[in-house]
Image (cartoon, rainbow, N blue to C red):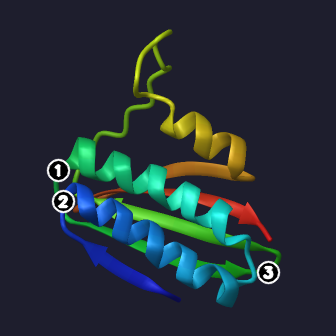
Amino acid sequence: MPSASFAPVPSEVTAARHFAEDAGDDLGCVPEDLALVVSELASNAYKHAQSRFTVSLRREGDHVLVEVADTDPSPVVALPLSGGTSGRGMCIVAATAANWGTRLHPAGKTVWATLNC
């Protein structure tokens, strides 16, 4: 299972996206879809948790499980404001992924999504 840890800086969101693109072919998934979901989840981890975050990717049968873990214990999903420049990340994840959700754990939370591949 490919996994990598990233620092809470904007350039690491780009690094997480490249990590997913590189893993896409090996996992048998469309690299662009995988990269898009990882990028949105990594952006949320950077913006809201402001802590290191870990991206894990795992093939499970006919789908790929994407997990992004951070230290923020409070997942919040807000609807984007009309004309706003942010707030659409989880809408994009929901439109791209087959399913998604969150798991709380003592060190924070994991946001996960599954992609049909």
CA neighbours of label 3 inside 10 A, class few (<14), some (14 to 19), many (20+): few
Residue 115 higher or lower than 94, as above or below: below
Q: Nearer the viewer, residue 104 or 25?
A: 25
Which one is earlier in the sequence, the residue at label 3 or at label 1? 1
**Residue 38 horizontal/vertical position (percent):** 50, 61
- Horizontally, is 100 left or right of 52 in the view? right
Q: Which residue is mark 3?
A: 61
Tell me the residue at 35%/46% (across/down). 44
Tell me the residue at 26%/62% (across/down). 11
- Which mark is nearer the camera, 3 or 1? 1
Q: Which residue is mark 1?
A: 50
Q: Secondary structure at mark 1?
A: loop
Furthest residue in direction top, as rendered: 82
Q: CA distance from mark 2 to mark 3?
A: 32 Å
Q: Which mark is residue 8?
A: 2
Residue type indicated by callout 1: Gln
Tell me the residue at 35%/71% (across/down). 15
Q: Nearer the viewer, residue 26 or 100?
A: 26
Contact between labelled residues 3 and 2, with CB atoms less than 8 Å apart: no
Residue type indicated by callout 3: Gly
Location of residue 85 (image quadrant): top left
